[in-house]
Amino acid sequence: MTMAEVTKAMGARARTKNRAPAAAVAPPVEPADADMLKLENQLCFPLYAAARMVVNAYRPVLAELGLTYPQYIAMLVLWESDGLSVTAVGDRLHLDSGTLTPVLKRLEALGLLARKRDPSDDRIVGNWVTPAGVALKARAVDVPMRLLCAAKIELEEIDPMKKVLERLIEALLPLQPSPAR
């Protein structure tokens, strides 16, 4: 279905929705509307399937490091910028503190992070990479290339894919509920 067909179908749906509702009888499904509901025409499904498959592909590689995927991406952020608050890590990962805090506490229990309250504001918790966390970084350095090689994805393919996905994230961010901090 082309973008023009999608726009036309959406316009037809909007005109149908503005009519007075029939007595508990669903309006007939227009052929264009039926096409909109085909799995093959959904953007969300390949994104969902790819995200699930990426996490599954990382699982055995990260298991060698003793990490889950959420723990790994939290460590990536902290290896880049040590000492960030929970809120700052959450902002980078698009995760709220209720989701992220258990991940960070588990990393602390593994000895990879030290979590310390800010002396000037005890509501702020900084997350500091420990020597064990630094040592883990040296072991993790080959993880991205191992995944690319296993998936047979060329380095030249990565940047265009990332740009499209980053644009999608940028477009969807305003539609997200405000994170609970």
Image (cartoon, grey):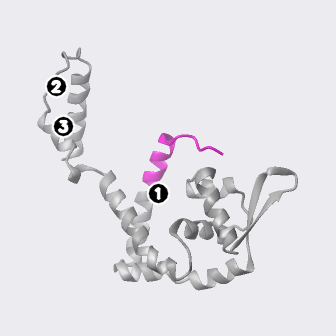
Q: Which residue is mark 2?
A: 27
Q: Compared to 21, does 87 lie above or below?
A: below
Q: Compared to 80, does 123 lie above or below?
A: above
The disc label shown at residue 105, or none: none
Whole-percent x, y for residue 170 in the image: 49, 50
- Which residue sits at x=77%, y=52%? 124
Whole-percent x, y for residue 47 in the image: 35, 58
Question: Which residue ends up furthest to the front in the rendered image?
Answer: 109
- Which residue sits at x=45%, y=74%? 59
Q: Which residue is mark 1?
A: 166
Q: Secondary structure at mark 2?
A: loop
Amino acid at dot 2: Pro
> What is the magenta segment's predominant secondary structure?
helix
What's the magenta region?
A: 166-181
Separation of marks 3 and 2 at Cα, in angstroms: 11 Å
Image quadrant of residue 134? bottom right
Viewer-side label of 3, 2: 2
Viewer-side label of 3, 1: 3
- Does the residue at mark 1 contact the one at mark 2 (Cβ under 8 Å)? no
Q: Is 174 one of the magenta-colored residues?
A: yes
Separation of marks 1 and 2 at Cα, in angstroms: 38 Å
Q: Is 66 one of the magenta-colored residues?
A: no
Left or right: 178, with 45 as reference point: right
Q: Nearer the viewer, residue 11 or 100?
A: 100
Q: Which residue is mark 3?
A: 33
Q: Compared to 110, does 94 lie above or below?
A: above
Which of the two discs, 3 and 1, labels the residue nearer the N terminus? 3
Left or right: 65, with 15 as reference point: right
Image quadrant of residue 150? bottom left
Separation of marks 3 and 1 at Cα, in angstroms: 29 Å
